């Protein structure tokens, strides 16, 4: 593990977008019903995910372990991504009834 980054922490775009993607995947296929495989050419490994939250946990942890972000920034990014997805879903469901 590398030391924390030497700059002020902000919610990262990668975390915001990944959180939104996780929320959308769970909305589309249902919580705990994901069937996702991601292959890494760097490590020559394939990871399987049954749950979008497990995938997102790995994304968040990887950004922290690589010293790109610290936990607070990634937690904030996760909250932003999920919040925006929820707001868009609420907005879209409301517009369908107009």
Image (tube, grey):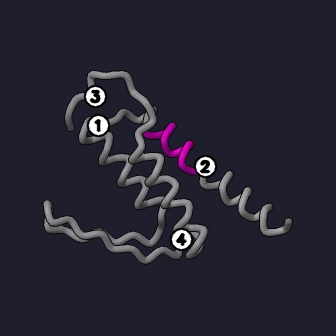
Residue at (43, 30) in percent of width and height:
10
Which residue in the protein does label 3 denote? 4
Q: Is disc 2 in contact with disc 3, using a CB cutoff of under 8 Å?
A: no
How far separated are the C-alphas under marks 2 and 1?
23 Å
Q: Earlier in the sequence, mark 1 or mark 4?
A: 4
C-alpha span from label 2 to label 3: 27 Å
Q: Is residue 6 magenta?
A: no
Q: Of label 2 and label 3, which has the lower sequence position?
A: 3
Q: Which residue is mark 2?
A: 84
Query: Horizontal and vertical percent for residue 16?
Result: 47, 46
Check residue 30 in the rendering and tell me which mark sits there, or answer none.
none
Q: Position of residue 57 (x, y in %)?
A: 41, 53
Mark 4 and mark 2: Cα distance apart in space: 21 Å
- Give the main secondary structure, helix, strand or loop, of the magenta stretch: helix
First reached walking from the N terminus: tag 4 or tag 2: 4
94 in relation to 50, above or below: above
Label 3 element class: loop
| Residue hosting label 4 | 32
Would you name the residue on which mark 1 appears?
68
Magenta range: 74-83
At 36% from the left and 54% from the top, the residue drawn is 58
């Amino acid at each position: 593990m590398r030391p924390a980054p030497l700059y002020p922490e902000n919610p990262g775009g990668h975390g915001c977008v990944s959180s939104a993607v996780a929320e959308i995947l769970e909305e589309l296929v249902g919580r705990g019903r994901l069937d996702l495989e991601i292959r890494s050419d760097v490590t020559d490994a394939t990871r399987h995910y049954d749950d979008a939250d497990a995938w997102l946990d790995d994304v968040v942890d990887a950004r922290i372990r690589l010293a790109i972000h610290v936990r607070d920034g990634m937690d904030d990014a996760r909250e932003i991504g999920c919040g925006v997805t929820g707001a868009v879903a609420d907005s879209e469901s409301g517009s369908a009834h107009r």
